[in-house]
Amino acid sequence: MVVGIGTVVLRLHGNSSLKGKRKVVKTIVKRLQNNFNVSVAEVGANNSLGRAEIGLALIGNDRRVINSKLDKVMNLVEDMQLAEIIDTDMEIMNL
């Protein structure tokens, strides 16, 4: 079994409320879930208006497929242009 995990740290420009932040984060989370069938959630910076941290996880049996999907997920977040990507982190583990 191969497990791929990742985090994306985002900077939300021009955001002045938690409601606005939730809207952006929810849009990103839903689109990732629908397009890639991954587990996604906001995992950090919960009370920060200008920053969001999203975590995701994939499970499969082929390391190359998991790596490819993680790359595509990161590319989709960037292509959506809802927020600036500050940092990304990916890890793939064989269990």
Image (cartoon, helix red, strand yellow):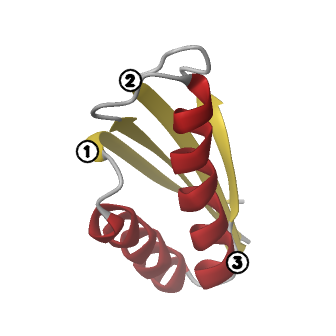
| Residue for badge 2 | 50
At a point 46% along the width and 20% down the height, the residue shown is: 49
Q: For residue 60, what is the image quadrant? A: bottom right
Circle on res. 37: 3
Q: Position of residue 79 (x, y in %)?
A: 29, 70
Name the N-terminal-most of marks 2 and 1. Answer: 2
Foreground: 93 or 85? 85
* Amino acid type of the residue that numbered disc 2 sits on in the rendered structure: Gly
Query: Mark 2 touching mark 1, by CB under 8 A?
Result: no
33 left or right, relative to 28 = right
Name which of mark 1 and mark 3 comes first in the sequence. Answer: 3
Q: State the SS at label 1.
A: strand
Judging by the rendered image, the residue that carries numbered circle 1 is 84
Residue 91 vertical position relative to residue 49 in the rendered view, above or below: below
Return the residue nearer the eye: 57 or 51. 51
What is the spatial separation of the Cα atoms under label 1 and label 3, in whole angstroms?
A: 23 Å
Lateral position of residue 61 relative to residue 20, left or right: right
- Do the CB atoms of the residues marked 3 and 2 lie less than 8 Å apart? no
Find residue 40 and report its horizontal and vertical position in percent: 67, 55
Q: Earlier in the sequence, mark 3 or mark 2?
A: 3
Amino acid found under the numbered disc labelled 1: Glu
Q: Residues within 10 Å of mark 3 (few under 14, many from 20)?
A: few
Mark 1–mark 3 CB contact (< 8 Å): no
Indicate which label's residue lies in the foreground, 1 or 3.
1
Identify the image quadrant of the C terminus. bottom right
Q: For the residue labelled by badge 2, is the local secondary structure a helix, a strand or a loop?
A: loop
